[in-house]
Amino acid sequence: MKFTLSWLKDHLETEAPLDEIATALTDLGHEVEGIDDPARTLGAFRICRVIEAQPHPNADRLRLCRVETWPKGPDAPSEEVQVVCGAPNARTGLIGVFAPVGTHVPGTGVDLKPGVIRGVESNGMLCSERELMLSDDHNGIIDLPEDAPLGARFIDWRGLNDPVIEVKITPNRPDGLGVRGLARDLAARGLGRLKPMAIEPVAGRFPSPVGVAISDELKARGCPLFAGRTIRGVKNGPSPEWLQTRLKAIGLRPISALVDITNFFTIGLNRPLHVFDVAKIRGGLRIHAATGGEELLALDGKTYTLRAGQMLISDDEQPESLAGIMGGELSGCTEDTTEVFLESAYWDPITIAATGRALKINSDARYRFERGVDPAFTLPGLELATRMILDLCGGEPSEVVMDGAVPDTSRAYRFDPRRVVSLVGMDIPEAEQRATLEALGFTLAGEMVTPPSWRPDVQGEADLVEEIARVASLTKLEGKPLPRAQAGVPKPILTPVQVREQAARRTLAALGYNECVTYSFIDEGAATLFGGGSDAVRVENPISSEMTHLRPDLLPGLLRAAARNQARGFMDLALCEIGPAFHGGEPGEQHLQATGLLVGASAPRDPFGSRRPVDVYDAKADAEAVLAAIGAPAKMQITRKVAGWWHPGRSGVIGLGPNVLATFGELHPKILREMDVKGPAVAFTILVANVPLPKIKTPTRPALRQADLQAVERDFAFVVDQGVEALALVNAAQGADKTLIDSVRVFDQFTGDKAEAQMGPGKKSLAISVRLQPTDKTLTDKDIEAVSAKIIEKVAKATGATLRG
């Protein structure tokens, strides 16, 4: 949104300097992105007089000029400088524009310095319009009238001293897309007074020959109100210089008086309008939904084919305009236009946005209608535009014709002055709060506040508080400590899952992992590889083809990151991520994962040969370390029923019965090929929320229980079949006496041809160490033998093992 300072002052009576206005706009929520101030770029250029112009003694095409200047203004004494000039129109007595030494010339990008040209000193420059970036004319220097005030700044005399301000308007503030809306905010801040805007209806002198009609299916939503009037006898020449200058300043090209007037109202009052050439309209105008396939040559010179349901304005024979977006070329106004139909309508924002996006048309009208213009200003805007057309183009107006009615946007909310303190923390007197709301156009009646029709963003009591706070300035907020709810130690704020998430993150960092933050969206192929990719988690409007689905697991993102690193020469990686994965598309259908990925070797190359490829036991050890850090019990079961993206023989599931806590192991070679990762690669995924909470929920640690009796260790060697897993043997031994047996671990495995030669075909030997920890008495040999017998019995029953002789 661009506008000039003089345009703002048409609506705001203020003496505030430009910098203060810019600061206030940003503070009010309209971020100032840039200011083009001619005083900063052209302020040094002043009107001068050439006392004498003589031929250069050493160059035929150059002239030596004595120039009379007034460096500090017309009231200061004049000075005389010598300038070498190559312009053909340089002459004695010429009134021109002078740039002194040290001036930056924007047209050339040069900072003027004293120089010597063909052996003659030259100080300063006589400027052309191109050097001041006023036009492309460089045939000669600027030649001003004799009555131009000598010594005055050129921009002041030419009327160029009008800064252009560019602000960023947020989508929820459509009123800021008009200069008057910004002026209203500044007036509420106290930077001036909002000038009243008189709206005098223009009396119609004849019935309009062009009628309007809205189809019934659109009147309820698409176009609630369409109004207009015919103006005959107009003269559509160039618009006045002040209007052209204002439009040029903000980047708009003046076209004709009629078109420039509609642009003036679009920018100034956020009221897009359109004018039709009545001579090119057949019958009346009707607003209807396209049946599909209609074509329209728009004002941008492109032909658009409409889809069914998109809104059109048509006459009795053909489409004439894309409703609320862009007019048609066939009914556009030209210099020969003498009779026009001026349209002012209110269009549904959603319908306009959908049509504009589908047709890929960006226009000032669409930009404003899709954000929501003031519906109550539809008819007043028509009257103001009619008055301006009559003033600038002449003509005779008809009566207003309209169909539909102004949509009812009235609503009221309770006003509670105390909410400003409770929601924002600012102590603002009630009288000031009420004055702020009234200055912004709100209507107050007792404890109820009615927002104005131009503020569709105000939808509740909290929005009223926001208006009061931003006008008062959020920079006045003071930091205050929160009061303690009670004496003593406060209750924990973080939830158990949040505490575990922090613990998992610290542990992974301590283990040497580098944390990644990948997108929650992945492509369908990767999602399918990891058990996802269904329509339930498909994104309706993905920002790219690689982000079409919610991720079912964190591993796809980490593998993509590993592939990118390997492509750049980093082959040994330890990556981790903690974040949500999604098993559905509804709220709550997500779970927190802590995932680690190891790729390549376990250590850098060294002369001692300690480097080896990462394996399943690296992933298992790290997974168990993280589980221990987040409070998982020490005794957990490991099973081998894993998902399809894990290597079936080199992976496992850590759990408590059916409750899965983590999965670890090598990734399937097929997955590595699909993700373009060079192995070996191992990983683990921990389901943080599945770890059971401690039974004793106290903020302190439980008491330390340390046995004061001597522990006893016994070793057992069993002969089992080759297919028996060591875990089955360990679990069986552990279950022989859950009170007395503290731990069981495998310390030896004897397999191969020699083992089969000693123990029989298909056999192997597994040796375990069992630690017995008494708690109430010292164990005797009889007690130890009894437990040992139970262990042998349990292991034999569970695995068919026999004690090795």
Image (spheres, rainbow, N blue to C red):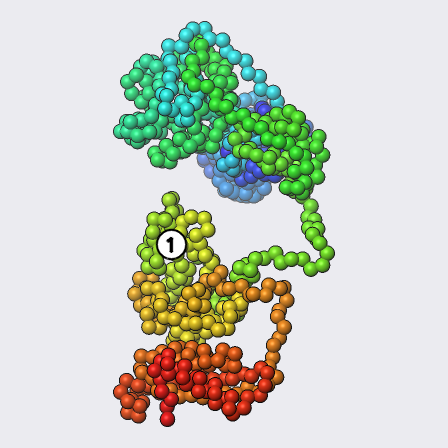
Q: Going 51% across and 35% down the picture, which residue do you hit?
A: 172
Residue 779, placed above or below residue 449: below
Q: State the residue position of label 1.
A: 522
Percent position of residue 499, x then y: 56, 61
Q: Going 35% across and 35% down the picture, which residue do you hit?
A: 358
Q: Going 58% across and 82% down the picture, which residue do you hit?
A: 775
Q: Nearer the viewer, residue 28 or 82?
A: 28
Percent position of residue 553, x then y: 40, 59
> Left or right of 694: which side holds 205?
left
Q: Going 64% across and 35% down the picture, which residue do you hit?
A: 468
Percent position of residue 106, x then y: 51, 38
Residue 660, placed above or below residue 97: below
Q: Nearer the viewer, residue 321 or 248?
A: 321
Q: Quadrant of the C terminus?
A: bottom left
Q: Quadrant of residue 716?
A: bottom left
Q: Regarding mark 1 in the picture, which secondary structure is present there?
A: strand
Q: Quadrant of residue 561?
A: bottom left
